[in-house]
Structure formats: C-alpha cells, structure tokens
Amino acid sequence: MKRGIGFGKIGLNLGQMKIGEKEPDKDKGGGEAASVDDGGGFGSFGKMDSANKIQNLLVAENEATDNNDGYVEEVNPELAKMMGFSGFGSTHKSNRDINKDENKKAQQFDVDAMFASVARTAQERNLVNNQKLEEAGKAELESEFVVPSGARGDSSGGVDDKTKTSDASDDSDSDDEVVGPLPPPSKKNDDDEEESDEEREDTPVDKIPRSHEIKLEHGQKAITSLSLDPSGARVITGAVDYELKFWDFAGMDPSLRSFRKIKPCQSHILNHLEYSTTGDKILVVAANSSPKVLDRDGGELMECIKGDQYVLDQSRNKGHTAQVNSGTWHPKIKDEFMTCASDATMRLWMVEKRGRESRVVIKCKNRKSGLKANPTSCTYSRDGLLVCGACVDGSIQMWDHRKNFVNVALQVPDAHQFGFEITGVQFGYDNRLLATRSNDETLKLWDIRSFKKPVNTATGLISKFDQTDVLFSPDDKLVVTGTSMEKGDKGGKLIFFEKDTFNKAFEMTVGSSHVIRAAWHPKLNQVLVGSGDGVVRVYYDPQRSFRGAKLCVVKKRTEAKQVNYIATQRIITPYALPLFKEDSIRQKSTYRQMVKDRKDPVKSHNPDPPQAIKGTGGKLAKGGSTLHSWMARQIAVKNKDDHIDPRERILRHAQDSEDNPYWIAPAYAKTQPKPIFRTEDPDEPPEKLTKRETFG
C-alpha cells in the first residue's frame, strides 16, 4: 500500500520499491531523482552529472514560463536559480491547472543540483568581478607607469581582449603570479645618497666608545692596576695608596662610590690585579714576594709562600724571594695562574687547599751572556699553550706549556732596548700577533710565525710607569696603549693604532695626568682608563655600549631625608576635664618637642665640660688633676684657721654654750639645776686655774 502526506498544495507520496521492479529510465529527464513509482516521492539520491541536473531544471522552468492558460506568478529567474525554487512547478502554473489536476504529483527536487547551481552562479559572478577589477588595475597602471615589454600585453603597452581573458583564467587557476600593479621604477636622488651614507660599514674608529664619560674617584695617588670581571658587572682598582676598591655598576648611583675597600698586602703597592676567567677569584700582585688570591668579595683564599733568600738555586725554593712584578690567569685552566718577579723566575701556581708551593719554576736568562734576566711582564697565549715572559734586558721569551720549561720555544734577544722595562705584553685575539710596550718609548707588533723582527713599530710613546698597558680592541683591528704627560701637555693620551698598517687611527687626551692602565671590555664595549691623578674614567657610547656605566648613570641619586616622626600617639578627648586634656590639640613632631625640651632647664642640663689639664682625674679640673688632690684642696680651703690653738678654738664657743645649753645642762636641770664645778685640781698647777672653765 501507498501512504500519502499532504503539505497544503504539495503532496508527498512515500512508496516502496517492490522486489524485482525495474529502476526508472535515467534518460527520461527525471534521472535518479525521480520517484520510484508514479505517485512520486524523494526516491534515491544516486550519481548524476551536475550539467544534466541543471539542464533538466532549466527545461522545467521554460515550460512553466511558456504556459499561457492562466495567471503566472512573477519570479526573479536569477533568485530562483540561486535558491533552487525553479524546480517547483507549482510556482509557475496557474491556479486553475492546479485545481484541475487532483492527482498532481508532488514536485521532485535534487539537493545536489541545487548546490551545483548556486556554486556555478557564484563562480560566474566572481569571474566577472575579477575581470572588472583586473581591467581597472591595468588601466590605472598604464596611466601612471610604462608597462615593460616582458609584461602581459603587447609591446606597445596595450592589452587585447583575448589576453585579458586568458590572463584572468590563469590568475584564477594559479597562485604563483604576483597580484597587483608593478613596482615603480627606481629614482636616484639625494635621499638615496643619505641612505647609502647611513648604511655604509662602520670603521674601527667609529666603534670606539668615547662620546660619554664618568669618573670613578679612587683617591689621590696614581692608578697602578685595573681589572673588570668577565661579565662586566664589577671593577677593581688598585693604586699607590695600597688600597683595593670594589665598584659595582648595578649597585652604584650617580654619586659613583665604591662599596668596599681593603688593603690586602698592607703597605705594598698593588702592581697588578686580575679577575679569573670564571670571575669568582681575584689575583693580587703587590710589590712583595707573596701574591694572594681573593674571592669575589675580597676574602683571602690563598697566599703564596715566600722563598728562602739564602737559597741560591731558585728551583729549590718554594716561592719568590724578591718583588713580584706581574701575573695573570691561565685562559683554560681556571685554578692556574702565573707570576714573575725580580728574582729572575716565573712561577706557575695552583689554587689548592693544601700546599702553597709553586708547581713550576721557570728561570729567565739572557741567552747571549747566560746571566739572569728579571722578567717585568708575563702572559699566556689565547689558547694557553704558550707562556710568554718579557725581561728587563729587552728580550721576549716563550715556553711551551705542554713540555718542560727548560728550553725556550721562541725568543727574541733584542726585542727592545736593554735596561728598559717592558711594561706590557699581550696576545691578539687571532693568537698569532703579539704586542709589546716598553719604557724605551716604543710599541711593537710581532708575528709568532716569523719571530725574528717586528711586523710594525711605533715610536715616540713616552711612559714613566712600569705598569703601562697595551691591549687589542674587541674586533682585533686596533692596538691601544697610553702615554705619560710631558711638559707642556694638557694630559696623557690614549692612542689607537691600526693593527695592519700601524697608522695612528685615533688619539684622545684623558684628563690632566698620565695614562697608566687601560681596559676595553668586549661585552660592555666600554673603555676604562686609569690615570695618575687617582681617577678611573669610563668611556661609553649610549648606542654601542651595553650595561656597565649606563646602569648607574640613569639611576636617581639617593639622598638622606630628615623625617620628623610623631613623638607620642595623639589621643583626642574633646569632652575630657582640663586636667586630662593634652597640652595641644595639634600634632607634635620631634622637632617641636626638641625645641620645647631645650627650654626646660632640667632636660637641657649642660654636661660638665672636659678637663682642661691632662690627667687621670674626674671632670672637675679646677680642683686638681686627681680626685685625691681635689679633696685635699677642698679640706684645706675649709680649715683656714688651722694656725689657732685647738683649746682657743673650743673656748670661743663657751659663751654660746652657756647661754644655750644643749647636751649636759638639760639633763641635770631637774636633779641639779645649779651646776657645781670643781675649783681646784691638785694635779694641776695653780697658774693654769686662774681662768675658770665652764662647759654647757
């Protein structure tokens, strides 16, 4: 049986296909969307080309439009195509036909066909819009710029319709082509020249931080040692005043005060200070024979033992026997350091808890005469494989760290003038070039691959100190050293030489004193210069430098402020009796309370002044230097009439005692009102009894 469901004018018949029944023919126009039986229904949704479905819908719509039997409802065809209403025949037929056809089948529709129709319509509209936009863009491009011959279109600059159509289809299919107008042609003007100047590569001189400066006031004596930790957070300075000061960039305010100062080696000048590679230890080399190792905060970790002065063979000594001139840490081994002294030895030490003896003893000799040569400066190579020492005889000697230190690996006997100290020796960052600075007014650059003569030499560099530095810039393109102030100069100079040509690239006058120590930190990109006036100047650039001096400059200066606190808690009792009311309703501060106390004579009692005469007595200096003398003097002042006879002193109170008795007469007033005295004494002579003695 078949059961029908009516929806107003549209009826829906649900039927079942019998077993063995043949499917309807697809060529009749119904397709798979046709009903299984004649009564209609949804049927089955099978496979069908979207073109056939759309064609069937258009045919049905044309038939409904051509019917002139009755009233035809006006429907927008595009809206019908988009919404899929064109498949409903009841919309286009007249009411008369609908009433006559009682057994009219419900209009059949296909969902796939509806979606296909909507997609096609949207695609066509998008295609038209894209073509219009593309034509407008090409017209604007042709009006402002000349289209190159390689661009789309003919060589004359025009674009034909076929090309437009093909390009539009290509644009819709491919995403690799550039969308939009072509970029304008380049124009050369003055702005490009300015940009080229800005984009030009900076020279090594441009990288020198020198625009801004701060001063770290160490003292009044010359700065002989200077060092920064590897992170650049702290600075340590040593001077001729024997003091070691610690500076912390992050903890300082614009007042630039050091947070700690110590005297690690009593009254000995600090020749060299250096942080270890890890930054947790400090090597202190003073003008004595016992270098020290301190921790980061100045606590002593190790003190090198002093050798025996009466032992001639220095290899048998445990330590130095003369003044230590310089020292340095090993770049790879964190606990090893080296020192050189005026006992013609260089020693390698290890920071250990047990034992303070040197691990290796290196003897420095003049290779021509075989005599001893005192080393004045020492250093390691960047990889730590070479140990270099510069001696006072002008020679430079190197030993291999991996072998025994008997024979030298490299040497130059006459590197500098004999008898002048080589104050600084430093390896370059490439580990091939070596720079040496001497008091013979020269700076020389050596290549260890050809170690017979210097690569470059600079002369006329006056130095009056044994601690004058030489260093390389962080980019390894400049060699830096300082000079002392001559007569007529404004101050010492810090001179920068090009490493390749050794031309003077730049020089700057530092303060009004000698330039002794210098350091250029690679991370901070800041230059620190220690001068002979006890000031460490820090040069930096706000754009090129990082942290360091920039941290303390921007801070606000901390000033002590006087704060007046309330002396007592204020208790307001408006309805209390006058006896219990406070003196003043207004709030009192410590200042006002202090002024009031000064007016009170009890609270403001002036203490006794100190004694004017030196001594061990009390505060009363007028009485004498001691308490005993003061008391004796007071007794002497009271007994002014000590020269009078004691009997006469007593008898002068006789009349007063007789008139006003106090002790004896009142006791005998009742029993013996009239006193009876003995007039004669047989034991005394009569001449002493001429005067009567009475006692009250």
Image: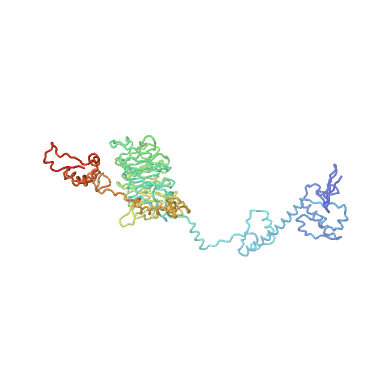
Left or right of 152 on screen, residue 69: right
Q: Nearer the viewer, residue 322 or 202?
A: 322
**Residue at image location 31% in from the left, 37% down from the top:** 307
Whether residue 459 is visible: no
Q: What is the quadrant of the N terminus in the image? A: top right
Q: Locate residue 36, reporting x and y percent.
A: 83, 47
Q: Locate residue 9, reporting x and y percent.
A: 83, 54
Q: Locate residue 45, reporting x and y percent.
A: 78, 47
Left or right of 532 on screen, residue 621: left
Location of residue 161 with respect to 447 vertically, above or below: below
Q: Nearer the viewer, residue 90 or 630?
A: 630
Residue 678 found in image quarter? top left
Residue 327 found in image quarter? top left
Whether residue 109 is visible: yes
Q: Locate residue 494, reporting x and y percent.
A: 37, 53
> Extreme bottom residue here?
143
